[in-house]
């Protein structure tokens, strides 16, 4: 990997390990980042266990989700999710696809996920659903064809998170700390909403609250900078920090 992107590779490794440590990812799922200074490429690991990735595993892809330098590495079948979103969302710099147990009940029940507390506002006022069955009929549920990725990107639209029926979720970020913040707090919001629903009526943030709190969550150098440091320290405490850099 070129020196230019070495920092980005190290950040993907940290982001991925944080998301495993915080329960957003398990053995499945993947994180990517748009290549710095080269917006028509993205960086993502080869297919491997997310908690074990190192910078050596990071590969460079075109927005068609082809390897820039073809090799024999096994690749994530669902990488088209990333390429197809980067194509249509120039503002998106990082993406995660995952199957968190917190979000799955919403993906299965089709109950709308709504922001219910300050940090939960990071999911935005609307979290759309995408059902692969609608356009593609019976599939393995893996998003592997470019047209499936394009369909998912259309469903995401200008939103920040899309829930995939009977499958999982995909979230976007303006950078990796922003992405990790959104992915973790989407799950915490889902947990809080589910728990509140068991107690009584769920009252979501108002539109104005969602806009104001959401802007606070997205401020560069704000919350996501603090959570990046916090979750990094949690990685250190659990011995799951990458040994490099
Ligand atoms: Mn998946």
Image (cartoon, rainbow, N blue to C red):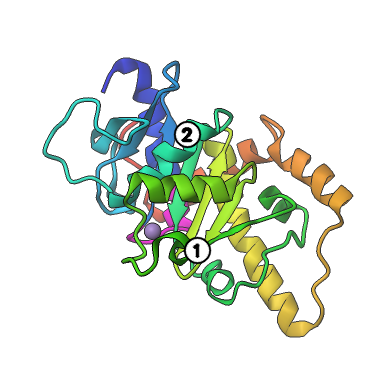
Question: For residue 32: magenta?
Answer: no
Question: Does residue 24 belong to the magenta stretch?
Answer: yes
Quadrant of the rendering where the C terminus is positioned: top left
Q: Where does the image place residue 147, in percent across and percent down from the top left? A: 39, 47
**Position of 59 relative to 18 (above/below):** above
Residue placed most toward the observer, 158 or 59: 158
**Residue 230 in sight in this render:** no
Q: Residue at x 81, y 44 (%)?
A: 211
Q: Is residue 164 above or below residue 209?
A: below
Residue 124: where, in percent of width, then height? Answer: 71, 49
Write the start and end of the magenta stretch as one range: 16-28
Residue 38 percent location from the top left of the image:
41, 18
Left/right of residue 30 with respect to residue 110 in the rendered view: left
Callout 1 secondary element? loop
* Kind of element beneath mark 2: helix
Residue 102: quadrant of the picture: bottom right
Q: Is residue 163 above or below residue 155?
A: below
Q: Badge 2 is on which residue?
A: 86
Mark carried by residue 131: 1
Can residue 205 be seen here? The reply is: yes
Q: Is mark 1 within 8 Å of ligand 1?
A: no
When asked about the image quadrant of residue 136, the answer is bottom left
Q: CA distance from mark 1 to mark 2?
A: 20 Å
Position of residue 227 measured from the top left corner of the image (x, y, whole percent) = 61, 44
Mark found first going from the N terminus, 1 or 2:
2
């Amino acid at each position: 990997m070129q020196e230019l992107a070495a920092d980005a590779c190290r950040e993907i490794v940290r982001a991925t390990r944080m998301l495993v440590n915080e329960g957003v990812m398990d053995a499945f799922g993947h994180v990517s980042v748009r290549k710095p200074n080269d917006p028509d490429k993205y960086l993502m690991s080869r297919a491997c266990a997310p908690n074990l990735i190192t910078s050596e595993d990071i590969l460079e892809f075109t927005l068609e989700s082809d390897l820039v330098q073809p090799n024999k590495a096994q690749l994530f079948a669902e990488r088209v999710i990333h390429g197809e979103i980067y194509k249509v969302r120039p503002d998106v710099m990082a993406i995660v696809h995952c199957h968190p147990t917190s979000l799955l009940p919403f993906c299965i029940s089709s109950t709308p996920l709504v922001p219910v507390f300050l940090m939960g506002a990071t999911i935005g006022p609307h979290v759309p659903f995408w059902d692969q069955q609608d356009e593609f009929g019976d599939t393995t549920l893996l998003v592997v064809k470019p047209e499936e990725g394009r369909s998912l990107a259309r469903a995401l639209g200008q939103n920040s998170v899309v829930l995939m029926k009977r499958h999982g979720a995909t979230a976007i970020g303006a950078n990796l700390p922003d992405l990790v913040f959104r992915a973790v707090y989407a799950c915490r919001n889902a947990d809080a909403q589910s728990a509140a629903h068991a107690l009584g009526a769920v009252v979501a943030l108002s539109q104005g609250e969602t806009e104001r709190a959401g802007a606070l969550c997205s401020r560069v150098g704000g919350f996501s900078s603090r959570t990046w440091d916090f979750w990094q320290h949690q990685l250190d405490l659990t011995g799951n920090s990458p040994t490099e850099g």
